[in-house]
Image (cartoon, grey):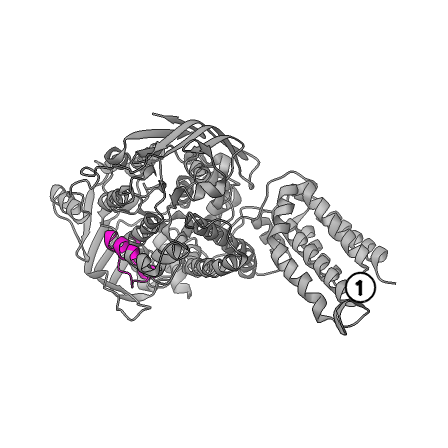
């Protein structure tokens, strides 16, 4: 009922302290909303993608991008129509379709979305979940809250995995003459696939609760921890490096 | 939970005072709550059962008669998480289960589920074992030694950082058994624990049950050869009660309940395909990657030669994690391959084309049925065909439902497991694929039901590849057998 998001590797990010990584991700998410130039925003996104590709491999980075592509397209395609400020770029007669401001905001939104997605993905792809949990606890988050956070981050991919499994099974049920489906049919087919994924997800909730309790979750006894973060010897240096990097980005790319 | 209950947990776990019964159930009745208008039928009525401490007990129950529900009731998670009306008294080592929370049973009673996927909570094999030990508050050294020993014992050492979705069905079952071993509770409830395991691990489990000092209750819906001489006591869940007639009588009644006394449905079947089709793989090489571990990160499937012809019934056997499912996914076009050929009647096909020729019945039917009624399920694919009229669709659907013993107005979500499995097969029957892969069809079905499904699917002359771990089942069906070991497939 949970899906692993960890991608085994030996790159620099794997040796980076999980506490520092967690803090960096939170700070990066804030940084993306600071008034920075578009060039700066996409430079940081590009760096994230590059670091990701060096650590988890290009295919993982590409897979992540493909998974957010539908939502990204949806945002980028519809955002420009909602913004009326700025100079007109495309218009039909007297009706302005897209403005410079609309295009700029859509580009910025896409950059933020890609950046935040990669920052979070890289955290979970290069840190085993138990270490994410320990990092959360080191910031004084109670155990149960930490477990909820980590479970949520594995439960969402579980639903995604169920969705792809169900979509596969649906494709196996297509009739022989069902070649080259039209887009309308594809969209129609999404409804039962989504419904099934939802049903699978809902059905798994009591099983997950059962399994957690049978494994001792809920006990008042103080839990011990199989892992610790002592193998990461430079949490302070790593945190400092992260902060310096983000400050440098801010100084370089802020809007004057 | 008050301190008194915590005290009761520790007394349960630590008490070594001899007690007559590890488990005592008296006058148990249970009925699931119904979510539809139709009232659910009660599963147990006035059921009583005593399991002595240190005993090895086998409880046989035909499919869908409440075996898993009974196991969940014993663990205190039903009706807590699976709502229903429960009456009667259950005592675990003398303590009334009604006064305990399920987590208080951690060091007392371990449950291994029939479906391993539903029990995984952690992200890696190692973490799965560590979680309950952390709950017990064990020291790091103690945890490490227990985890290392259990992983080594169950051959999972190299998979310790692997995630659940990258494991095969048998490997998942071994993880749960390793967790049970690491927790070291006094009472083990093993629901179909031998299912999914290959012979090596079945033998090991047998040894573990036989030689250990634990109280063991194995629940099974088929009598396996491994059970011979393993248990002190055999029980049967019959007519909503647990009964213990003499062994011979019990097995005979069980066989009758499972319809094993009926003739093999395949024995009288004469399969004469209208056209002889052929599916051939030559020099097929495929690679699968485990993303979550650097050890054993890459797994290769190599098929020098494989052929399947219309009307043939071929079995595929092999140890856990040997590549059976990987090969099946390639054969039905779900996954790609690096080199080699898959030819249908001499023509190479793309993955998409293969998926229209080879039907793959997943082990879990719930991933393949998704519509509100049986009628909707059966007509879904037919309605997408432009060459069929409504009347013809209705006729085909009705005939198919009749053949598989399904009611068109039933809701799949509330149907029993064997019926859902039959529905899954019926859906494919209507697709009329020339070939079918049946992944562990026998798991959670009686032999008779599984053989009947095979017979029906073969009715139109389809060639069938059957994946199974059960040698008894394989013996009943096989014409030819392929074996796969460490990814390499060969004909036996």
Query: Is residue B244 visible to the viewer in this orientation of the structure?
Result: yes
Q: Residue at x 39, y 47 (%)?
A: B116
In-front residue for pair B298/B27: B298
Q: Position of residue A75 (x, y in %)?
A: 66, 63
Instruction: Determine the secondary structure under disc 1.
Output: loop
Q: Residue at x 32, y 59 (%)?
A: B374
Parent chain of label 1: A
| Circle 1 crowding by C-alpha within 10 Å: few under 14, some 14–19, many from 20 | few
In-front residue for pair A230/A4: A4
Query: Is residue B468 visible to the viewer in this orientation of the structure?
Result: no
Q: Position of residue B74 (x, y in %)?
A: 30, 56
Which quadrant of the figure contains the N terminus of chain B? Answer: bottom left
Q: Position of residue B11 (x, y in %)?
A: 36, 55
**Which span is picked out in magenta?**
B396-417
* B293 sits left or right of A101 in the view: left
Reply yes or no: does residue B141 show up in magenta.
no
* B490 sits left or right of B456 in the view: right
Q: Position of residue A241 (x, y in %)?
A: 77, 49
Reply yes or no: does residue B398 show up in magenta.
yes
Q: Is residue B272 above or below residue B79?
A: above
Q: Is residue B199 above or below residue B167?
A: above
Q: Is residue B270 above or below residue A195?
A: above
Which quadrant of the figure contains the C terminus of chain B? Answer: top left
* B466 sits left or right of A135 in the view: left
Q: Residue at x 15, y 49 (%)?
A: B244
Residue bearing the label numbered 1? A35
How many marks overall?
1
């Amino acid at each position: 009922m949970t899906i692993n998001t960890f991608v085994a590797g030996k790159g620099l990010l794997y040796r980076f302290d999980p506490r520092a990584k967690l803090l960096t991700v939170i700070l990066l998410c804030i940084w993306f909303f600071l008034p920075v130039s578009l060039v700066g925003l996409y430079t940081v996104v590009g760096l994230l993608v590059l670091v990701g590709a060096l650590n988890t491999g290009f295919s993982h980075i590409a897979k992540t991008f493909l998974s957010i592509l539908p939502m990204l397209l949806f945002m980028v395609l519809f955002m420009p129509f909602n913004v009326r400020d700025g100079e007109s770029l495309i218009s039909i007669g007297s009706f302005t379709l897209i403005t410079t401001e609309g295009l700029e905001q859509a580009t910025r939104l896409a950059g933020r979305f890609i950046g935040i997605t990669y920052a979070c993905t890289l955290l979970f792809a290069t840190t085993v979940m138990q270490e994410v949990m320990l990092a959360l606890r080191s910031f004084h988050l109670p155990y149960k809250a930490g477990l909820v956070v980590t479970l949520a981050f594995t439960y969402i991919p579980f639903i995604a995995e169920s969705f792809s499994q169900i979509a596969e099974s649906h494709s196996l049920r297509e009739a022989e003459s069902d070649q080259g489906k039209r887009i309308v049919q594809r969209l129609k087919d999404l409804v039962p696939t989504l419904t099934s994924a939802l049903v699978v997800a809902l059905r798994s909730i009591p099983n997950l609760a059962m399994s957690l309790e049978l494994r001792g979750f809920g006990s008042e006894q103080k839990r011990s921890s199989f892992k610790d973060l002592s193998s990461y010897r430079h949490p302070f240096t790593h945190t400092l490096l992260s902060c310096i990097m983000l400050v440098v980005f801010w100084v370089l790319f802020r809007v004057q | 939970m008050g301190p008194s209950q915590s005290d009761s947990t520790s007394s349960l776990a630590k008490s070594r005072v001899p007690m007559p019964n590890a488990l005592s159930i008296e006058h148990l009745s249970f009925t699931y709550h119904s979510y539809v208008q139709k009232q659910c039928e009660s599963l147990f009525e006035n059921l009583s059962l005593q399991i002595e401490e240190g005993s090895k007990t086998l409880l046989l129950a035909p499919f869908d008669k409440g075996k898993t529900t009974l196991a969940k009731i014993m663990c205190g998670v039903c009706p807590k998480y699976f709502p229903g009306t429960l009456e009667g008294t259950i005592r675990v080592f003398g303590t009334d289960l009604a006064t305990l929370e399920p987590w208080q049973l951690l060091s007392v009673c371990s449950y291994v589920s029939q479906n391993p996927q539903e029990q995984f909570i952690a992200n890696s094999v190692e973490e799965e074992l560590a979680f309950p030990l952390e709950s017990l508050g064990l020291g790091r050294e103690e945890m490490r030694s227990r985890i290392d020993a259990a992983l080594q014992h169950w051959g999972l050492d190299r998979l310790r950082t692997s995630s659940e979705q990258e494991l095969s069905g048998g490997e998942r079952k071994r993880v749960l058994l390793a967790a049970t071993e690491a927790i070291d509770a006094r009472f083990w409830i093993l629901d179909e624990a031998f299912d999914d395991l290959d012979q090596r691990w079945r033998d090991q489990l047998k040894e573990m049950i036989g030689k250990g000092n634990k109280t063991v209750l194995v629940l099974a819906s088929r009598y396996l050869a491994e059970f011979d001489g393993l248990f002190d006591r055999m029980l049967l869940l019959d007519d909503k009660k647990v009964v213990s007639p003499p062994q011979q009588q019990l097995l005979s009644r069980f066989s009758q309940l499972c319809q094993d006394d009926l003739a093999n449905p395949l024995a009288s079947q004469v399969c004469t395909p209208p056209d002889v089709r052929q599916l051939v793989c030559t020099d097929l090489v495929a690679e699968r990657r485990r993303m979550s571990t650097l050890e054993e990160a890459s797994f290769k499937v190599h098929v020098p030669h494989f052929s399947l012809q219309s009307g043939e019934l071929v079995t595929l056997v092999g140890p856990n994690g040997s590549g059976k499912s990987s090969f099946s996914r390639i054969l039905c076009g779900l996954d790609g391959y690096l080199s080699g050929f898959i030819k249908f009647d001499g023509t190479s096909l793309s993955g998409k084309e293969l998926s229209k020729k080879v039907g793959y019945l997943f082990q879990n039917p719930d991933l393949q049925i998704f519509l509100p009624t049986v009628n909707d399920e059966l007509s879904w694919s037919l309605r997408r065909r432009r060459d069929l009229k409504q009347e013809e669709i209705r006729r085909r659907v009705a005939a198919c439902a009749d053949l598989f013993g399904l009611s068109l107005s039933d809701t799949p979500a509330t149907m029993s497991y064997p019926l859902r499995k039959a529905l899954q097969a019926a859906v494919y029957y209507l697709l009329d694929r020339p070939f079918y892969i049946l992944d562990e069809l026998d798991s959670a079905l009686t032999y008779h039901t599984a053989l009947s499904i095979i017979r029906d699917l073969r009715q139109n002359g389809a060639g069938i590849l059957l994946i199974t771990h059960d040698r008894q089942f394989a013996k009943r069906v096989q014409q030819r057998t392929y074996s796969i070991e460490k990814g390499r497939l060969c004909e036996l």
